[in-house]
Image (spheres, rainbow, N blue to C red):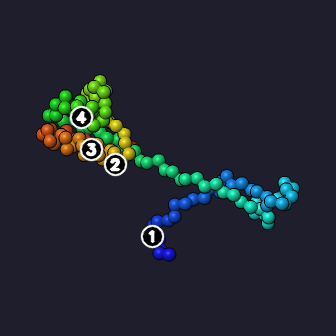
Amino acid sequence: MSPRPTGTRARTKVRTRNALWVPHLGEEDTGKRRPGAPGTAVITKTKPQTKRPSLYRVLLLNDDYTPMEFVVHVLERFFNKDPETAHRIMMHVHQHGIGECGIYTYEVAETKVTQVMDFSRKHQHPLQCVMEKK
Ligand code: TYC
């Protein structure tokens, strides 16, 4: 067996919290047997250890040059906003300098940022899109 790289460990975790104490078959159950006593069997349930992924906000930054209609289009196209919501978010960014377009897992957020930056550059607008950990 090859040694595990340092800093890693097996992911299997046995939950002993809901262990059931079961008397051996054929033995009389007096109700007085204690966990760990001879003649006592343990059944453990295993539960997959799930972890919720970290979430990231995708933000648009205001500038003086990108047309409002372009920003609305970006919000509809890449963030699936309806026209009214897109216009509201655009105006929020225009008035406050920054605004949230959506919240995603890392790779989805990164893809949105890249899509918006590439699209803006292609149309020669200085629109900036960034992500931040929530
Ligand atoms: N401030 C821009 C204008 O007046 C509009 C704008 C809104 C630009 C939102 C960027 O993220 C932005 N044309």
Q: Label 2, on which residue?
A: 107
The three-letter amino acid code for the residue at tag 1 is Thr
Mark found first going from the N terminus, 1 or 3? 1
Q: Is residue 26 above or below residue 134?
A: below
Tell me which residue sits at (34%, 37%) in the image. Answer: 102
Q: Which mark is residue 70?
A: none
Question: Which residue sits furthest front?
Answer: 26
Q: Which mark is residue 6?
A: 1
C-beta proximity under 8 Å, tags 1 and 2: no
x and y percentages locating residue 85 in the rendered image: 31, 27
Disc 2 is placed on an element classified as: helix
C-beta proximity under 8 Å, tags 1 and 3: no
Mark 4 surroundings: few (<14), some (14-19) or many (≥20) residues within 10 A: many
Mark found first going from the N terminus, 2 or 3? 2
Q: Which mark is residue 113?
A: 3
Q: Label 4, on which residue?
A: 74
Mark found first going from the N terminus, 4 or 3? 4
Tell me which residue sits at (50%, 75%) in the image. Answer: 1
The three-letter amino acid code for the residue at tag 3 is Val
Tell me which residue sits at (18%, 40%) in the image. Answer: 120
- Tell me the mark number nearer the camera, choosing from 4 and 1: 4
